[in-house]
Amino acid sequence: MEKANIDWSNIGFGYIRTDKRFVSNFKDGAWDEGCLTSDDQVVISECAGVLQYAQTCFEGLKAYTTEDGHIVCFRPDLNADRMIDSCKRLEMPVFPKERFIKAVEDVVAANEAFVPPYGSGATLYIRPYMFGSSPVIGVKPAAEYQFRMFCTPVGPYFKGGIKPLTIRVSDFDRAAPHGTGHIKAGLNYAMSLYAIQDAHEKGFDENMYLDAATRTKVEETGGANFLFVTKDGTVVTPKSDSILPSITRRSLMYVAKEILGLKTEERPVYFDEVKDMAECGLCGTAAVISPVGKIVDHGNEICLPAGMTDMGPVTKKLYDTLTGIQMGRLEAPEGWIKVIK
Ligand SMILES: *Cc1c(COP(=O)(O)O)cnc(C)c1O
């Protein structure tokens, strides 16, 4: 298979149109059989539920070329499960798990030319999503939906080396108690755009959101979960019902405990504890882990001992182990790697 003419090491995290995407429509209470199509345009009613009341959710996962030349993706079953949870919370029909996984396989296989080669650092990002497509003007769920899945090659996240992030404690909230913070809904991102633009203008890479009710506990950033390493080497991640359950974070916690033999804790993390942490990282599909070097709380700086030039030692070990599993250099726990080709 001839690869697309792309300078793999120099693409960013942007959209590049690929050959095929999967589309299925829900009508009269059932999903049609769906198909792969070359048509990258979506045509819907001007009054579609997604356009009026933001009835939409999404997922994100990656496919890679492994060291021995296979094309694989990472735990797509968990993305399918999480999308089911998102759909239920948004009164959208569930797209069956087996069909979701089959669509991942079909989309990746149909776009093999766009799966970056091993060693390039680039990966194929897969974006499943669903939206209310039929007209809705009174506030209620749409009657018809479209499920789509496209993919786009994305460049190495740490192009030009690892740069620890500087983040700030945000005065905005990301998620309300008993709200929608735990599902992957576009609406959670829409209302975070103001805060992230404001953070960038003020020189910060990301916002650290605290729990909306008490503003004492660490939640997450706009699109990544936190991992901390305490000075005695325990890997800690915040527990909260309003955090999006990151698959990367869950996988890293497993790696920490079961493969690296580290002590792990998922528990409420008070912001007051953060100044005593040795390392801090942000986890998500895009970067696996991005190290955080500095956290600024209204002028008070917390400088993580791991510093501003590299990942801390535990963060690095976690990163190397998980990326080693994803790239086929290390043996994967049962069921983590789905071989597509
Ligand atoms: C998608 C997402 C993450 C990361 O989840 P992964 O499954 O690891 O990619 C974290 N937080 C939010 C708010 C997200 O939307």
Image (spheres, grey):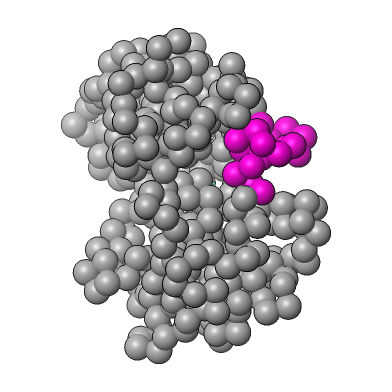
Does 323 lie within the magenta span? Answer: yes
Which residue is pictured at 28% across the width and 59% down the height? 193
Query: Which of these two is toward me, 157 or 267?
Result: 157
Give the image location of residue 34, x and y in percent.
45, 13
Give the image location of residue 141, x and y in percent.
39, 38
Q: Going by the picture, which residue comes out furthest to the left?
A: 46
Which residue is pictured at 58% across the width and 67% down the height? 312
Quadrant for the C terminus in the image: top right
Quadrant for the N terminus in the image: top left
Query: Which of these two is toward me, 86 or 117?
Result: 117
Give the image location of residue 51, x and y in percent.
25, 39
Q: How many marks?
A: 0
Left or right of 110, for residue 275: right
Determine whether 114 is above or below 290 in the image. Answer: above
Left or right of 125, for residue 332: right
Q: Going by the picture, which residue comes out furthest to the bottom?
A: 300
Question: Magenta segment range?
Answer: 321-337
Left or right of 318, for residue 107: left
Determine whether 187 is above or below 293 in the image. Answer: above
Determine whether 328 is above or below 320 in the image. Answer: above
The answer to whether any part of residue 77 appears in the image is no
The answer to whether any part of residue 325 appears in the image is yes
Give the image location of residue 92, x and y in percent.
47, 36
Which residue is pictured at 34% across the width and 65% down the height? 205
Which residue is pictured at 65% across the width and 64% down the height? 314
Determine whether 87 is above or below 133 in the image. Answer: below
Does 71 lie within the magenta span? Answer: no
